[in-house]
Image: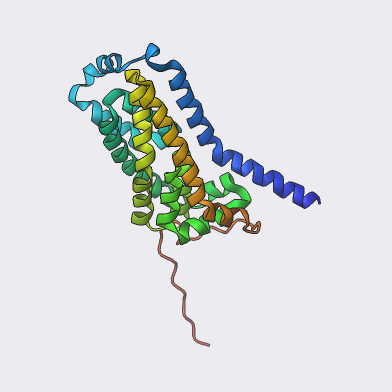
């Protein structure tokens, strides 16, 4: 009975850590909605960007590329991009930044190995890493289809576990397209004071959230129903290094 209680408590803490970025993202979007065009509008933002001139988009993309290191939620930055550049431009810049940040995260996670993710995910790490390694493209694609899902954590888990680079990163880029467009439109609608556009974008994000949960339930079920296992020892293969050759000896 005590073991069941401890396992339940450990699982709850794990999911609270994983869902923390989602809570921060929701809070940031709600804050932007409450501030609205009365606080800042598109013209004010463009005046602030004047000193950067033609380099403003490059600065925005560069910031998105290193965003995971700042621990800031990507959805809020995308919404701000919509306020700065408009829906289509912000979507293009955000997708470019997503590709660069995913690439950075992938190789950093591969270099660091499995230990950081084992500490973060606890007893569920083994199940998450197996799902990420087995379904690399589908895993990151469905994680990103849900615009408030902790994509960074899912990508790191896959990279640290030996998932393939291109399927994982392309899953991130393609999966973020719907959520990125809707979030950029949400920010653009706020900056321009278009209540209808903002409302439609908000509804679209909710629908995307629901669809992400529905399509990704196979992976959630696989993770939740997996038996609790001891953390796997870190191997050279998981860190992207060639496995050590066995020494052949004669009897």
On the picture, is 156 further left or further right than 57?
right
The figure's colour scheme reads rainbow
Residue found farthest to the front = 196
| Depth order, front residue of 98/211 | 211
On the picture, is 230 further left or further right than 78?
right
| Depth order, front residue of 165/206 | 206
Can residue 228 be seen from the camera position used here?
A: yes
Figure label count = 0
Q: How far across and down, in percent of the image, does residue 251 sit? A: 53, 88
Q: Is residue 53 above or below residue 181?
A: above
- Residue 87 sits in quarter: top left
Q: Is residue 72 above or below residue 120?
A: above
Q: How far across and down, in percent of the image, does residue 139 sit? A: 45, 53
Q: How far across and down, in percent of the image, does residue 9 sit? A: 70, 44
| Depth order, front residue of 139/164 | 139
Residue found farthest to the bottom = 251
Residue at (47, 21) in percent of width and height:
31
Can residue 236 be seen from the camera position used here?
A: no
On the picture, is 74 further left or further right than 227?
left
Residue found farthest to the right = 1
Residue at (71, 49) in percent of width and height:
7
Residue at (55, 35) in percent of width and height:
20
Q: Is residue 102 above or below residue 192?
A: below
Residue found farthest to the top = 38
Q: Is residue 183 above or below residue 144?
A: above
Residue at (57, 44) in percent of width and height:
120
On the picture, is 124 further left or further right than 51?
right
Q: How far across and down, in percent of the image, does residue 86 sit? A: 28, 27
| Depth order, front residue of 199/4 | 199
């Amino acid at each position: 009975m005590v073991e069941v209680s401890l396992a339940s408590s450990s699982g709850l803490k794990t999911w609270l850590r994983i869902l923390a970025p989602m809570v921060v993202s929701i809070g940031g979007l709600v804050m932007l909605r409450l501030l609205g065009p009365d606080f800042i509008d598109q013209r004010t933002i463009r005046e602030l960007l004047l000193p950067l001139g033609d380099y403003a988009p490059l600065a925005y993309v560069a910031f998105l590329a290193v965003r995971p290191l700042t621990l800031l939620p990507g959805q809020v930055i995308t919404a701000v991009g919509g306020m700065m550049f408009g829906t289509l431009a912000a979507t293009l810049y955000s997708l470019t930044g997503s590709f660069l940040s995913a690439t950075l995260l992938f190789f950093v996670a591969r270099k660091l190995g499995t230990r950081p993710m084992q500490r973060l995910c606890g007893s569920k790490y083994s199940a998450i890493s197996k799902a990420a390694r087995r379904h690399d493209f589908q895993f990151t694609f469905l994680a990103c289809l849900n615009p408030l899902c902790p994509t960074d954590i899912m990508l790191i888990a896959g990279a640290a576990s030996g998932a393939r680079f291109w399927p994982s990163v392309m899953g991130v880029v393609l999966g973020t397209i719907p959520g990125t467009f809707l979030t950029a439109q949400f920010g653009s609608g706020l900056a321009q004071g278009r209540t209808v556009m903002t409302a439609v974008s908000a509804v679209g994000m909710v629908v995307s959230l629901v669809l992400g949960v529905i399509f990704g339930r196979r992976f959630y079920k696989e993770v939740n129903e997996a038996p609790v296992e001891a953390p796997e020892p870190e191997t050279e293969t998981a860190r992207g290094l060639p496995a050590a050759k066995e020494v052949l000896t004669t009897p």
